[in-house]
Amino acid sequence: MANKSNGSQLGMVSSDLHVKIAWLYHVEGMTQEAIANLLKISRIRVMRSLSNSSKSKVVVTTINASASDQIALERMLETRWRLESAVVVPTPSEVKNLERSIGHAVARFIDEAMQDGMTLAIGGGATLHSSLDYLERRELQRASVVGLVGGLPNSRWINPSIVASRVAQRLGAESYQITAPVIVDAPDLRDRLWAQPTLQDVHERACQADLAILTVGEMAATATVFNHAIAPIDLLQPLREAGAVANILSYFVNRDGVLVDHEINRRIMAIPPTEIAALPRVVLAAGGAHKIDAILAALTAVRAQVLITDLATASQLLAAAPDPG
C-alpha cells in the first residue's frame, strides 16, 4: 500500500512559486525560515529566490509581476477556506479553453506531487482529462493510481475510468479500477458488487491513497453527468428539489456538502465524498461562473486542502462566500 510519509512532506504549491515567495516575504512579512517551513524547501532556496526576484524586477518596492493578482487571490482563498494551497491560473479569453487551462495546472501539480511509493486516487471529467496532454512521462517505482468512479461502456473522455488508466500510463504506475457501471439498477446490487473481493481491494486502496484529485459538476442540463446521459436528465429537477447543488464523484450533494436524500445516491459505484475527506491531501480542480455553488459545496464535501481554479472563478468564490471574520 501507499507510503503515507511521502504526502505529508509536500509543501505549499502555487501558480508561480517565486512570486509567492516574494509575496510572503515582502507583503505578509514572513521570515525566510518561516517561508522555507511553509513551502517545505530549504532556506537557501528562499534566499536565492528573493535575490533573483530583485534582480529580475519581480520586486520593486511593491510586487511587480502580472502574477501578483493571482498570488493575492491564492492567499485569500487559502485563508478563507484554510487551504494548504491554492493555485490560481489566468482566466482564458475563451470559455472553451478554461478546462484545458486548469488541466495544465493539474498536470503540473501531479508532476510535482507524485513520488515513488505513492498512491494517487483520481476522478474523471473534462478538466482532469485535459491534464493528460501536459503530464510528463515518468517511471515511478511502487506507485499506483486508483480510479474513484466506476466505468462507462465506451472509451471517450466521459468514461471516468479513462483518466485513471491514462494517468497511470504516464506515470509508469499500476492502475486499479472500479470495474462496475457508474450507476447500477438497485442499492442491493451496489452492495453486492462492493462485497466482491476485487472491488473491496480497490476500495481499500482508494481509502489509503496519499493524494486524491477530483473535480465537480454543476446541477444543469449542460453538466457532463446529464448532458452525456450518465444520469437520466429527468432526475435533474427532482434532485434540485431535494437540495442538490453539485455532482461530485457522481454523487449529488447539497450546499453543505452532504448527500441529498435521493435514491440515485444509493446506486452509485464510486468512493463516497465522506471517505475522500479522510485522505491526507485532497485536491479540487474546477472553474467557471456556472460552477460557483458546486465548488463551494465540494470544498466542504471532501474537505479539500488544495484548490486549483482560475482568476475569475477565484474572485467570484470569494464574493459568494466572504470571510466570516
Image (spheres, helix red, strand yellow):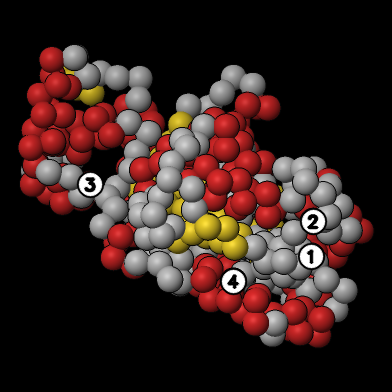
Upstream in sequence: badge 1 or badge 2: 2
Q: Earlier in the sequence, mark 4 or mark 1?
A: 1
Residue that appears at 83% across and 71% down: 184
Q: Residues within 10 Å of mark 2 (few under 14, many from 20)?
A: some
The Cα atoms of the two marked residues, 2 and 3, are separated by 40 Å
Q: Secondary structure at mark 3?
A: helix
Disc 1 from disc 3: Cα separation? 40 Å
- Along the polypeptide, which appears first: circle 2 or circle 3? 3
> Sequence order check: which comes first, mark 4 or mark 3?
3
Residue under label 4, please give it: 202
Q: SS class of the residue under badge 2?
A: loop
Please say if the residues under marks 4 and 1 sit with CB atoms less than 8 Å apart.
no
Name the residue beneath numbered marker 3.
39
- Label drawn at residue 181: 1
Local SS, label 1: loop
Callout 4 crowding tier (Cα within 10 Å): few <14, some 14–19, many ≥20? many
Q: Nearer the viewer, mark 4 or mark 3?
A: 4
Taking the spot 12% from the left edge, 44% from the top edge, the residue there is 42
SS category of the residue bearing label 4:
helix
Please name the amino acid that badge 2 sits on.
Leu
Residues under labels 2 and 4: Cα distance?
Answer: 17 Å
Q: Nearer the viewer, mark 4 or mark 1?
A: 4
Report the mark closest to the observer, 2 or 3.
2
Q: Which residue is mark 2?
A: 152
For the residues labelled 1 and 2, the Cα–Cα distance comes to: 6 Å
Of the residues under marks 1 and 3, which one precedes in the sequence? 3
Res 92 visible: yes
